[in-house]
Structure formats: structure tokens, C-alpha cells
Image: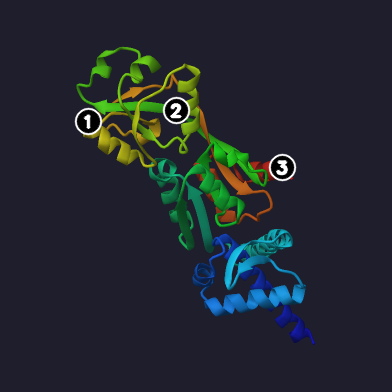
């Protein structure tokens, strides 16, 4: 009888994983099956069995195709996500005390943070925890926050949007501002103190305004009654610098993305007097169990948040 109970519990957990992954993959059963390393018919069968046992439909259908999520299905999926996270937390508790320095760790972050701010911390982390598999996912701030909120990533590092999610604990990591990059000999270099009015006189190449504090930048221009001539946007600071080098416009980017040696072919003008500082946040789920090495990484990137400080912040946010 005990074995029957265990088998039933395992089957139900598998079904919840299938439901969760199908929803996460935009109702695409084929994609879900690939992520789960199983067959499409197997996923469909388990979903059908789950719905039959529960006596309700989780997904809306048009023939064999899933087209939406029912109202009770939304509640079931929310509970399924919670169960899956709790199971993962239980596993982490066991791992923490049996395999202290082994495991996996997924960080979601923006290109600018991954390219210019994280390398030194990642290098030290891999030296300190050589048996931990580290994964870095890149996206815009909203995608970063979503991945952490959904449990796809353990830690998020981004500016602005990551602080908008109620189930995330956001720790202010560091502040940064912006600079303008231009080819040597550009007229702006002889202008003296740069103003917004001087800047809008030239075509601008910058981040997509959905990225890296872009909404703040657009607000500064709007508040001044100015409309910059943005001729090209990108999520990658290196792409911005490439097109500035081609003479296609003036680059506006994070000051951390300019390196005097690597970018010697370009001149840099500090514009921190034109824009408020932006804050980069570390985000973790308030209900996640953090492994020791996760605390270790947080302290590497934000030394003012040691394990005790993070735990105190989690306690206050509960």
C-alpha cells in the first residue's frame, strides 16, 4: 500500500510538472515535451488523465490544439508552480547539508551587466565553487524579472523592472550613470559642458528604451521638452559602439560599458550631470531556499549583502 501511495504521488508530481511546463511554453506541447525529455503523446496523455481525475479542464482546446487556460486552470497552474518550487526547495535543503559545494545556479541578467559588471565576480565564484554549474541567461529587465519570479532563474540582476514584482526581494546592488561616446575629433568634444540641447542636435544611437534604464532616459528628454533623434537602438553596448565608430551617430550608453583601453578608438564624455543615477538590483524569490554558494555570489557582486544581511532582508519582506 505504501508503494502504491508513492507511485501515485510521483505520478501526480510528474503531471504537475507537465502542466507547468506546457503553460510556460505558451501551450506548445511539443516544446514542453522537449524540455521535459519525454514524448508529446506522453505529455498529452498525462494532462488528460489529470483533468479526468480532477473532473475539470485546465486548458481550453480547439480539437487537439490547446488554445487557452480555463479559469479553474489558472488556479491549478498557480498551485502547481508553488508545489514545484517547494519540491525544489526541499531538494536544496538536502543538498545544502549533504553536498555543500555542488549544485547548479542560474543567473538571469541583461547584456550590459553580463558583459561589463559580472565577469570578475563570476571568475571568483567559479574559483571558490568549482563543482557548481553556473548558467547565465540574458534578456531585458522584464524578462530577467519574469525568469526569477517563475523559478527559471535563482537570481536576477537588472535595472528598474526587477523591482516591480511583489514576490521578489530586491536588494540595491550598485548605482551607475551614463556617458556619450563619439569618434575622436567629433564637434561635441569642443562644446564644453554637454547639455541635452547640444546632444539632441546629433543623431543618437542608444539602448532600446525598454532596456537598461531606457525609460528613465526618455523621461529626462521628455521633461525637458526635447525629442532626441534616435536613429538606431540595440540591447548590446558593443553594437552601439560599432555603429558610432562608423560615424552613424553619437552613442549614449552605461558608463561601465566604456573601457579606455579597449575603446581607445572612441572618446568618452561623462553625462552623469544630465541623468539621475540608475540602480541595479539583485532579485530573488522571497520563498526560495538559497544555497550557501548563492549567498556567496550575492556577496561577490554586492559586498554589503552578506548572508546575515540577505536573511534579514528576506525576514523583513515575509
Q: Residue 177: name its quadrant.
A: top left
- Whole-angstrom CA distance, mark 3 to mark 1, is 49 Å
Disc 1 marks which residue? 247
> Measured from the top left, where is residue 61 in percent x and y?
62, 68
> Measured from the top left, where is residue 112 in percent x and y?
41, 41
Pointer 2 or 1: first along the chain: 2
> Measured from the top left, where is residue 100 in percent x and y?
58, 62
- Whole-angstrom CA distance, mark 2 to mark 1, is 24 Å
Where is the N terminus found, in terms of image quarters?
bottom right
Label 1: which secondary element: loop
Pointer 3 or 1: first along the chain: 1
Image height of 248 relative to 77, above or below:
above
Where is the C terminus found, in terms of image quarters?
top right
134 left or right of 290 in image: left
Disc 3 marks which residue? 317
Label 3: which secondary element: helix
Q: Is residue 186 visible?
A: yes
Q: Residues within 10 Å of mark 1 (few under 14, many from 20)?
A: few
Label 2: which secondary element: loop
Q: Residue 27: name its quadrant.
A: bottom right
Image height of 252 relative to 8, above or below:
above
Residue lying farthest to the right in this orientation:
1
> Measured from the top left, where is residue 118 in percent x and y?
43, 44
Q: Nearer the viewer, residue 170 or 248?
A: 248
Disc 2 marks which residue? 177
Residue at image point 65% right, 41% down: 309
Amino acid at each position: 500500500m505504501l508503494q502504491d501511495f508513492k507511485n501515485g504521488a510521483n505520478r501526480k508530481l510528474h503531471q504537475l510538472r507537465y502542466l507547468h511546463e506546457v503553460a510556460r511554453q505558451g501551450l506548445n506541447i511539443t516544446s514542453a515535451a522537449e524540455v521535459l525529455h519525454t514524448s508529446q503523446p506522453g505529455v498529452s496523455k498525462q494532462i488528460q488523465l489529470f483533468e479526468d481525475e480532477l473532473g475539470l479542464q485546465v486548458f481550453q482546446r480547439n480539437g487537439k490544439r490547446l488554445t487557452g487556460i480555463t479559469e479553474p486552470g489558472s488556479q491549478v497552474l498557480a498551485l502547481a508552480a508553488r508545489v514545484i518550487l517547494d519540491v525544489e526547495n526541499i531538494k536544496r535543503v538536502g543538498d545544502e547539508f549533504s553536498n555543500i559545494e555542488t549544485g547548479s545556479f542560474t543567473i538571469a541578467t541583461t547584456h550590459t551587466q553580463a558583459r561589463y559588471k559580472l565577469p570578475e565576480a563570476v571568475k571568483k565564484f567559479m574559483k571558490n565553487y568549482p563543482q557548481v554549474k553556473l548558467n547565465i541567461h540574458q534578456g531585458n529587465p522584464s524578462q530577467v524579472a519574469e525568469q526569477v519570479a517563475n523559478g527559471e532563474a535563482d537570481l536576477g540582476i537588472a535595472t528598474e523592472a526587477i523591482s516591480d514584482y511583489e514576490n521578489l526581494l530586491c536588494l540595491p546592488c550598485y548605482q551607475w550613470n551614463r556617458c556619450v561616446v563619439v569618434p575622436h575629433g567629433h564637434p561635441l568634444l569642443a562644446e564644453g559642458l554637454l547639455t541635452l540641447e547640444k546632444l539632441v542636435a546629433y543623431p543618437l544611437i542608444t539602448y532600446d528604451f525598454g532596456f537598461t534604464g531606457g525609460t528613465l532616459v526618455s523621461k529626462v528628454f521628455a521633461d525637458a521638452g526635447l525629442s532626441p533623434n534616435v536613429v538606431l537602438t540595440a540591447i548590446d553596448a558593443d553594437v552601439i559602439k560599432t555603429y558610432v565608430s562608423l560615424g552613424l551617430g553619437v552613442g549614449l550608453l552605461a558608463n561601465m560599458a566604456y573601457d579606455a583601453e579597449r575603446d581607445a578608438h572612441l572618446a568618452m564624455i561623462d553625462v552623469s550631470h544630465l541623468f539621475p543615477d540608475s540602480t541595479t538590483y539583485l532579485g530573488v524569490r522571497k520563498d526560495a531556499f538559497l544555497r550557501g554558494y548563492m549567498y556567496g555570489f550575492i556577496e561577490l557582486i554586492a559586498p554589503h549583502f552578506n548572508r546575515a544581511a540577505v536573511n534579514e532582508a528576506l525576514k523583513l519582506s515575509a
